[in-house]
Image (tube, rainbow, N blue to C red):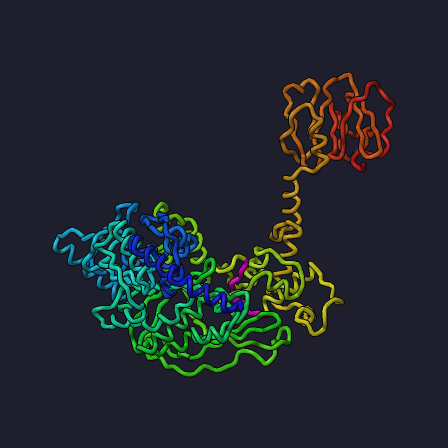
Amino acid sequence: MQRSIVLWLSLTLRPTRVLCTARFFEGQSPGLPNPAAMENGTGPCGEECPREVQETTITEGAAKIAFPSANEVFYNPVQEFNRDLTCAVITEFARIQLGAKGIQIKVPGEKDTQKVVVDLSEQEEEKVELKENENLASGDQPRTAAVGEICEEGLHVLEGLAASGLRSIRFALEVPGLRSVVANDTSARAVDLIRRNVQLNDVAHLVQPSQADARMLMYQHQRVSERFDVIDLDPYGSPAPFLDAAVQAVSEGGLLCVTCTDMAVLAGNSGETCYSKYGAMALKSRACHEMALRIVLHSLDLRANCYQRFVVPLLSISADFYVRVFVRVFTGQAKVKASASKQALVFQCVGCGAYHLQRLGKASGVPGSRVKFSAACGPPVTPECEHCGQRHQLGGPVWAEPIHDLDFVGRVLEAVSANPGRFHTSERIRGVLSVITEELPDVPLYYTLDQLSSTIHCNTPSLLQLRSALLHADFRVSLSHACKNAVKTDAPASALWDIMRCWEKECPVKRERLSETSPAFRILSVEPRGKAADEAMEERRRLLQNKRKEPPEDAAQRAARLKTFPCKRFKEVRSLLPFPHDRTCESPLWATGRELGELEPGKCLGVGFPFQERNPSGAAELRAGVHTHHLPTRAPVNAGTSAATPTAPRHPGFLLMLSLTVQRPPTRAPVDLGMPLGQA
């Protein structure tokens, strides 16, 4: 009965719903996007919408984008950093490419100074020099390319999954030296929205809306003359279905920009899914973000190798919930042979997390001569971990070469720093790129502080302490932009565990609570050894004592150095003196009461100093330890001799040791010399 009622209601309301939908489409202007289409434009069309739709205008950079308020999926403000960085990278890429043709680009906000073009390849450097010589010989002014203008020899850009067209419009308004920008999407409603936004920003002469499947569009541009100079892929999810077509449709030395938001797959939550999409097994580890970048680079290079092409990474970023890579694609059969030696398998211990890389291929030979390629030998580990006795997991293959071109990163960083008002996220871009320039380029993956300390169940050392210990042990160390507490170092795992054993001795772990089969027990059961351990102990001792290491010195140098530091008792006596004392002396000094007004008494740090009674008829009480001595006014006193000794010098005044304090008694008191002042 209930099923019949539901079926009847469904059949009754269906015509009404269809009629409302039809009236809505007739009354609205074209171009309203589909919420399910998202960034990649692959979702279904024809969803229900309200009768009245309010539009919202978003301003980002120099672009203004209009879209329905109810459809928020077309604009993601978190990705503004991604779009700003992409504009900065493409601008520097355009500077390099057009500089080889003798064209100088002009960026709004940049000082009008001609930059020296340092290209990424020797052939293009030679082209730049030849072009500059030709221009100087002919006396012509250098050609320029400005923002918003068509450059006939400029870049041909494709955004395969444009959605609202925001990225393509920003390219047209912020990146100089462009010939055309193709904003493609498979959704008809998304393409209508792109057309409206193109008209809104007045960039119809540069941006060309396109409705097609991104893969088919790129496959149709495989010819050398029809390829794109820049291809940007920013899908909602994995870009794996588009990579094969992208490496074929990009021009020689062209720029390929790829975003991956399926971090759960790349971070090791589903290794088999990662293999089906990217051709590599992902492992769960603290270095999963950098491993995700290397897996994507491996996948791009693997697909390019099928067509005798290879990739050269320019910049690889892990930020927020995605990874972003910028690579150049070249063609060369000889260079493709070296691709196997650029990939590596990862052996990771399940107990302590120590990892080892095993290259797939081996390249041997002298640079500049013929290189021989062969299979690599391995594995680099034993069946059980040498540190904790646990087994190893096998991941990869991953890209084992540098993931950044530091020269190119430096160019982008310099441009963003010189024009900070160009992007809203300039400060973040500068921070990320600054950390990248300091990363060790030839050290894949990293360890983290919490990983090392949690393995042996001890307190976590500071990042400064661990880095200092590694540097003192003659290892290189740096940070990583992918993790705030990462330690990137070329030190072997044995050196790291030696340092952690030394740290554990300062912060002991209760061994009785550890299982004998646990990684912590097996690691701590070995005594620290090697230079790393010694340096770690010395660094820890220095930090605890808060002293600097002093060079060796003899007794005379030590005595001379100690004379320059007043002791505590000297400060007490000095505070009671009615006159200044700033002259150093090596022997007792004497002065009369008449000379007190002009007296400039000396001081003998660590030995003694002269004190002159202000009132000639008065008396002074000297207190040294428990002995009290009363001296007449004119009686001389010399440290080391008694005041009653007849051989004492007949000079008015007396000498006080540093350990004495001075007080004036109200009346005269009997004299009790006791022991000599020098002995006191």
Q: State which quarter of the image contains the C terminus.
A: top right
Residue 562, image quadrant: top right
Residue 97, horizontal then vertical, whole percent: 26, 60
Residue 676, horizontal then vertical, whole percent: 82, 34
Relative to 532, is 433 above or below? Answer: above
Residue placed at 38% from the left, 65% from the top? 44
Relative to 581, is 259 above or below? Answer: below
Find the residue positioned furthest to the front: 1
Residue 126 shown in magenta: no
Residue 203, horizontal then vertical, whole percent: 24, 52
- Left of 358 or right of it: where is 30? left
Which stretch did the figure color magenta?
Answer: 485-493
Residue placed at 42% from the left, 79% from the top? 362
Note whether residue 418 is visible: no
Q: Pick whichever, 416 or 299, lies toward us.
A: 299
- Left of 331 or right of it: where is 573? right
Residue placed at 26% from the left, 46% from the top? 112
Residue 134, horizontal then vertical, whole percent: 15, 58
Relative to 650, is 267 above or below? Answer: below
Note whether residue 241 is visible: yes
Q: Pick whichever, 582 or 156, lies toward us.
A: 156
Q: Pick whichever, 109 or 35, lies toward us.
A: 35
Find the residue positioned furthest to the left: 138
Residue placed at 32% from the left, 60% from the top? 189
- Left of 7 or right of it: where is 388? right
- What is the number of callouts on the image? 0
